[in-house]
Image (cartoon, rainbow, N blue to C red):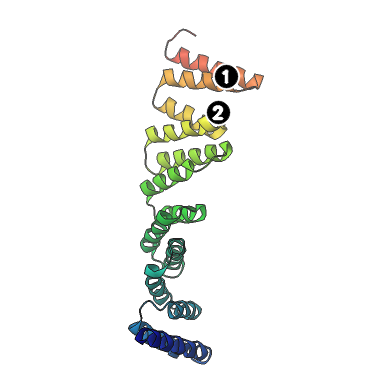
Amino acid sequence: ALTRDGERRDALLHRAAEHEAEADPDAACRALEGILARTPTHRPSLETLARLRDASGHHAALVNVYERLLPIAAPEERARLHTRIAETRERALADDAGAIAAYRQALALEDRATVRDALARALERTGRWEELAACRREQLDRLEEPAERAAAAHALGVLLEEKLSDPARALEAHELALRADPLFRPALDARERLLTDAQAWDRLAEAIAAEAEASSDGFERTQASLRKALVLAHRGAPI
């Protein structure tokens, strides 16, 4: 009976706060906090408070309400709440570190491409290159279309070379791109340049030969054969 009386009291006070919200949102927020002081898990009050905090632009308070909703939310709801927390921290509070942590928590509960993309953008904006490389590799592993895989792997290679000064891993990424699309020109050019820089002549000759074999264009096959001959001549091997 006491439980039912408490539930009725909270419901009535919540209804009164909702009515008051139109005339005096701040007073309504104080009333809702009063309910939550007695019943911290009163979901209707938390949801109404979130709506009011959002409408008033009190973003730090909004994040606080979202965090109080987390323990009583279902797993799929928690993923969405973490995403909202991340977006609010990123866009309204300029809290990149908090946003990145929240995006990661959302992904741990539900892997969504839009959230992973948002995490990648936040990592790139803050210059967290090693973490961005890991994030992009995870994105790559989830792609199935060869053209998308090739483009994503090449972009990873560019990141590894330009931001992390890691040509070995960059070369591996470009090789991944070429496994998806053996004639993806940006990856072909990057692989040839990296192997040339490393003076890895045998591997370079093999790579050019593989390029020629994969191509159905007679002119391109001839050009590749000529490049291979130049590489072999450069290292003094028989052509």
As drawn, the label of residue 182 is 2
Secondary structure at numbered mark 2: loop
Q: Looking at the rendering, which quadrant does residue 65 occupy?
A: bottom left
Circle 2 residues within 10 Å: few <14, some 14–19, many ≥20: some
Q: Which residue is mark 1?
A: 213
Distance (Cα) linking label 1 and label 2: 10 Å
Residue furthest front as drawn: 1
Residue 26 visible within the image: no
Residue 45 placement (x, y as % from top left): 44, 81
Q: Nearer the viewer, residue 121 or 232?
A: 121
Residue 90 placement (x, y as % from top left): 43, 64
As drawn, the label of residue 95 is none
Q: Residue at x 43, y 10 (%)?
A: 237
Q: Looking at the rendering, which quadrant does residue 31 occupy?
A: bottom left
The quadrant the N terminus occupies is bottom left
Q: Nearer the viewer, residue 172 or 15?
A: 15
Secondary structure at numbered mark 1: helix
Q: Is residue 69 above or below residue 185?
A: below
- Dot 1 and dot 2 residues touching (CB under 8 Å): no
Residue furthest top as drawn: 238
**In the picture provided, is 200 more to the left or to the right than 151?**
left
Task: Specify the amino acid type for callout 2.
Answer: Pro
Residue 10 visible within the image: yes
Q: Nearer the viewer, residue 196 or 70?
A: 70
Q: Is residue 173 above or below residue 114?
A: above
Residue 15 placement (x, y as % from top left): 49, 88
| Circle nearer the N terminus (1, 2) | 2
Q: Residue at x 39, y 68 (%)?
A: 70
Task: Specify the amino acid type for callout 1.
Answer: Glu
**In the picture provided, is 213 more to the left or to the right than 54?**
right
Q: Looking at the rendering, which quadrant does residue 162 occupy?
A: top left
